[in-house]
Amino acid sequence: QVQLAESGGGLVQAGGSLRLSCGASGSFRRINVMGWYRQAPGKQRELVATSTRGGTTTYTDSVKGRFTIGVDGAKNTVYLQMNSLKTEDTAVYYCNAEATSIDYTREESWGQGTQVTVSS
């Protein structure tokens, strides 16, 4: 199983920056995709950004040009650099990973979430 540990959330003023980190540990063969999702109060969880092991990235339109996702494959760690933050970025951010398990099945895991609050 994959365990994910997030860090880096907090309170920041609009226009500021934060960097989220998430490390994967546990028993698995390979992490294939890592990414970030977020859930604002009263809204559904939405994809923010993902990165494959090979470096292919996707972003939701609202964060393009402001957020950058990066993966350190050797450390099984994913980062999310968030710049020019807006109040609408306020949400709980969740790390997500898709891995190949020990028995070669696909396994998806979630972190516990980290709060990001952007004040005006």
Image (spheres, rainbow, N blue to C red):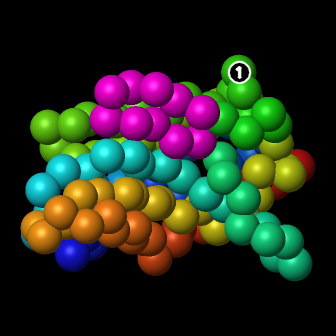
User: Is there any visible trace of residue 25 in the rendered image?
Assistant: no
Total label count? 1
From this viewpoint, which residue is outermost toward the front?
A: 104
**Residue 48 visible (yes or no):** yes
Foreground residue among 99 and 46: 99
To which quarter of the image does residue 68 belong? Answer: top right
In the image: residue 27, left or right of residue 115:
left
Q: What residue is at 85 percent from the left and 72 percent from the top? A: 43
Q: Residue at x 45, y 54 (%)?
A: 8
Residue nearest the observer in this picture, 49 or 84: 49
Which amino acid, by three-letter code, is at mark 1? Answer: Gly
- Examine the structure image and report whether residue 85 is included in the region drawn in magenta: no
Residue 52 drawn in magenta = yes
Quadrant of the rendered structure where residue 61 is? top right
Instruction: Assign a secondary structure to mark 1.
Output: loop
Mark 1 lies on residue: 65
Q: Position of residue 106 (x, y in %)?
A: 32, 64
Image point (39%, 70%), residue name: 109
Q: Position of residue 18 (x, y in %)?
A: 56, 42
Q: Residue drawn 25% across and 67% down?
A: 105
Badge 1, how many Cα within 10 Å: few under 14, some, many 20+?
Answer: few
Residues in magenta, as a range:
49-58
Percent position (x, y) of residue 13?
Answer: 75, 46
Q: Residue 58 appears at what percent x and percent y?
A: 60, 33
Q: Is residue 59 left or right of residue 29?
A: right
Rendered position, 70 above or below 46: above
What predominant SS class does the magenta segment belong to? strand
For this rendering, which residue is in front, 5 or 30? 30
Is 71 drawn above or below residue 110 in the view shown? above
Check the picture and name the quadrant holding the N terminus: bottom left
